[in-house]
Amino acid sequence: MFVDFAKIEIASGKGGDGRIAFRREKFVPKGGPAGGNGGNGGNVIFEANENLATLLDFRYSRKYEAEDGQEGGTSLKDGKNGKSVTIKVPVGTVIKEAETDVILCDLDENGKTFVAAKGGRGGKGNSNFATSTNQAPRYSEDGKPAEIKTVILELKLIADVGLVGFPNAGKSTFISAVSAAKPKIADYPFTTLVPNLGIVNYHNYNSFTIADIPGIIEGAHEGKGLGLRFLRHIERTRSLLIMIDVNSEDIQAEYDTLLNELQKYSEILSGKDHLVAITKLDTADEEKKAEIKNLKIKGYDKPIYTISSVAHLNLNKIIDALWEMIHK
């Protein structure tokens, strides 16, 4: 199951208290202060891991706690530091503070780490407070408290190309035809309910990734359909492929609507380089094919690609064009 949102509680370890103790050795009736320092509490650390692809695990485990630091010992022995907790998440996970929605960290590279809750510092033992005027202090320092917070995890897929189109525009069929991804495909809207990633092999030794998200409808930027939930998955893509069904009643209006939704959701999204593909060419009659040959789209000055994923028509051409676009 693909899960791209989770809310969890994290708590670092409390710092161990400093110790009040004195030397007690034979023939030393009045030994000096010998209380050790408390250990530091463990941290809560997030780490991006490329082998993970979903936040599903956080549906079942919602609380993560690091270990407390131990109390300082006698004979100047310091307490052990508490063990830290490392939470592995997929590459592309954004960590937000739940109360403020402020982004704390964007784990967009494999191996990148972030300390989300720092362990409390251990308190000082009484041996640290001895002075020339107070050679036997009878006080120590308490360990610092733990950091406890609720954080939100949001996964944003990282891909070279994001597929954009109305429901049933042929995006899932396309990604299954050019990669090994096998999304659910059916002849009705919103077949795709979760994002899919596909790796396209290009000329044997190269490859690039494509992200297929559920179809966009008018008002997607306000959350209509599955808009808000999945538009974020194409925020990181380097470029976009806008896909429009050849049987659309108004291709220009569909193109304008899609671009408008992208712009209202994010200026960055609408500014990404993109190509246009007219899909399902195998379903068009000769009159429609002739019409598409002379098609012009206002506001778009690049070649318009006509393809059929089912019949594998012109797929090599569009793959070449996508490769060229993302490697400009």
Image: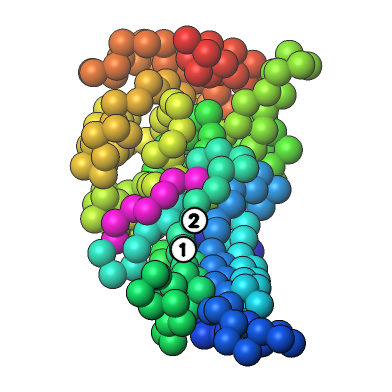
Quadrant containing the N terminus is bottom right
Local crowd at mark 2 within 10 Å, few (<14), some, or many (≥20)?
some
Direction from residue 216 to residue 163 in the image, left or right: right
Q: The magenta stretch spans which residues?
A: 101-107
Percent position (x, y) of residue 7?
Answer: 45, 70
* Residue 222, quarter of the rendered image: bottom left
Residue at 66%, 52% (x, y): give it: 52
Q: Which amino acid does label 2 sit on?
A: Val
The answer to whether the residue labelled 2 contacts the one labelled 1, judged by CB atoms less than 8 Å apart, is: yes
The label shown at residue 292 is none
Q: Residue at x 47, y 10 (%)?
A: 328
User: Regarding mark 2 in the picture, which secondary structure is present there?
Assistant: strand
Quick one: 103 or 201, which is closer to the camera?
Answer: 103
Mark seen at residue 115: 2
Camera-side residue: 165 or 237? 237
User: Going by the image, does 22 lie left or right of 207?
Assistant: left
Q: Judge whether residue 317 is colored magenta.
A: no
- Above or below, 163 against 73 in this view is above
> Where residue 318 sits: x, y (%)?
55, 18
In this rendering, which labeled residue sits more in front, label 2 or label 1? 1
Residue 102 in magenta?
yes
Q: Mark 1 points at which residue?
A: 118
Q: Residue furthest front?
A: 27
Label 2 – label 1 distance at C-alpha: 6 Å
Residue 93 percent coordinates (x, y)? 50, 51
Within 10 Å of the Cα at label 1, are there few (<14), some (14-19), or many (20+) other Cα atoms? many
* Amino acid type indicated by mark 1: Lys
